[in-house]
Image: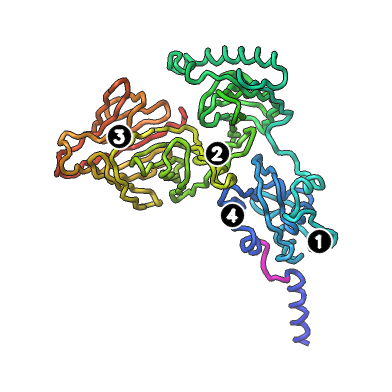
Amino acid sequence: MRKFLNISLWMIILSLNVSGDSGQAIYLRTCSACHGPEGEPFAPVFPPLSGSEWLKGEPDRAIKIVLGGLAGEITVKGKTYNGLMPAQGELLNDEEIASLLTYLRSSWGLREEAVSVEKVKAIRSNFKVKSGEGNLAEDILKEHPVADSSLLQDIRYRGHRGDKGRPIWDPSQNVKRLKELLSDFEAFVPNSGKEGQLIEKHRPYCYIEMKAKFTAAKSGKYVFKAKPGRYITFKMADQDKIISSGMMIEVNLEKGVHDLTIINWGHKWQGMGLYFGVRVPGEKDFINLSMGKDPNYLKVSETKTAYYKNLMKGTGPRSLLAAFPNELALVFDEEKCDISMLSCGNTIDVNTHYVGRGIGAALMEGRSVVYFHPEKSECRYIGRQLGEQLAPTFMYERDGFIVDDKFTPVEPYSLKRKLTISVKRGVNSKARFLLANGFDFKKEGNVVHINASWKITFDKDPVLEVIKGRSVLYLPIGKTGAKATVYNLEYIYNDEQG
């Protein structure tokens, strides 16, 4: 009798879950390599499952995707993805799929109903994949549409290709509009402090204009930002101004729908688009609202420095990006043995390399990006060492100096830099170490302001000179053979100005 009861008990347990694994265990074994152990992917080319609208509502859509995979362009939480998810129908049985989806639909902020084994069996019995790659996203969306969670609706575009290009839509209207826009642009230039120099260098000859309805899900402060290398006219509520690369505008909005106008300026039509983002109340990151391919930013750890080595716009081919846990990042040019970029916030848009199969140069993003443009010099890169939080110390020889260049992130937006500099034999005893040039530096004692967002503090007084109209920042160094000179610097980002 006892033997019969034991057999019956095991049959009941097996009927609940043939694999014996929980939904979480199945997820970690099958899905976490792409989607991350907590529903947030390591590589930004994969869509998140945490809070995904694709898991909400009836489970039919999710069941079909697990059974037959998914191919094509989809939008998840306001970002666009275009990849290929392999089918799992042959690897997972009905009980495992039901357990997996029940776990996903009740985790990371979701509170959807459990998925029954009978539901999975019924869909599997009538299910057939139409494409060799798996379910096509457009077919899945036709049968099971996802609720629109986008911030922009009723989007309308118009633009002008410039003097040598073919105008689109109404040419006369666009030429007239372009003249009005140019007038606005020139009115903006004096505010930049360049006294008209910007007009000749950046005068645009074409534009794209977008009008849309922006949905504010709740009342509060919304922050809009222009992407690097762009001039954007922003019009919403009481704001009507032109902002340049990386600049931000704060707008207080009531819950509801608001009219939004965005205009992007350009010199040539090729590559034109609308590139901007928004940070909604209560959130830390910006949501991309660009017309075109969504950016996928390099994921940065909260405890360790992340590294990226590939072609980056604005620096040399032998450059290394170090993204620190405190949101600051620098790019070190190993060919010129110097910093080439410094930024805060989002780092590299890896779309170019992941989606573009390695072609092209990735853009450095961020709330404020500083381009140092180091000059070519006699140098030799020796290597780097990793310290706490995997922060780097670069070792190199440059212009007769032997240098250990150590960086340490400090909360909230600060980066300490310890330069240990020795003079090689035969070098002028009055030699000075070139730190940076080309900026309109402002020196106040041991503090040097790079711009409104960035400043450098020094433990020893640096030398600031103007040579042929250019500001040059030097560090005085001791005599040949003397003890190494140590400078402690700190790069500080002012978030309120950024």
Which amino acid does the dot numbered 1 rest on?
Arg
The residue labelled by disc 1 is 124
Q: Residue 284 carries which label?
A: 2
Q: Are marks 3 and 2 in contact (CB under 8 Å)?
A: no
The residue labelled by disc 4 is 36
Provide residue 237's location: percent of width, then percent of height.
64, 21
In whole angstroms, how far apart are the C-alphas of marks 4 and 1?
A: 27 Å
The quadrant of the picture occupied by the N terminus is bottom right
Residue located at (64% from left, 48% from top): 47
Earlier along the polypeptide chain: callout 4 or callout 3? 4
Residue located at (49% from left, 40% from top): 347
Main secondary structure type of the part rendered in magenta: loop
The residue labelled by disc 3 is 435
In reply to whether residue 296 is colored magenta, the answer given is no
> Which mark is in front, 2 or 4?
4
Label 1 Cα crowd, 10 Å radius (few <14 / some 14-19 / many 20+): some
Q: What stretch is highlighted in magenta?
A: 18-23
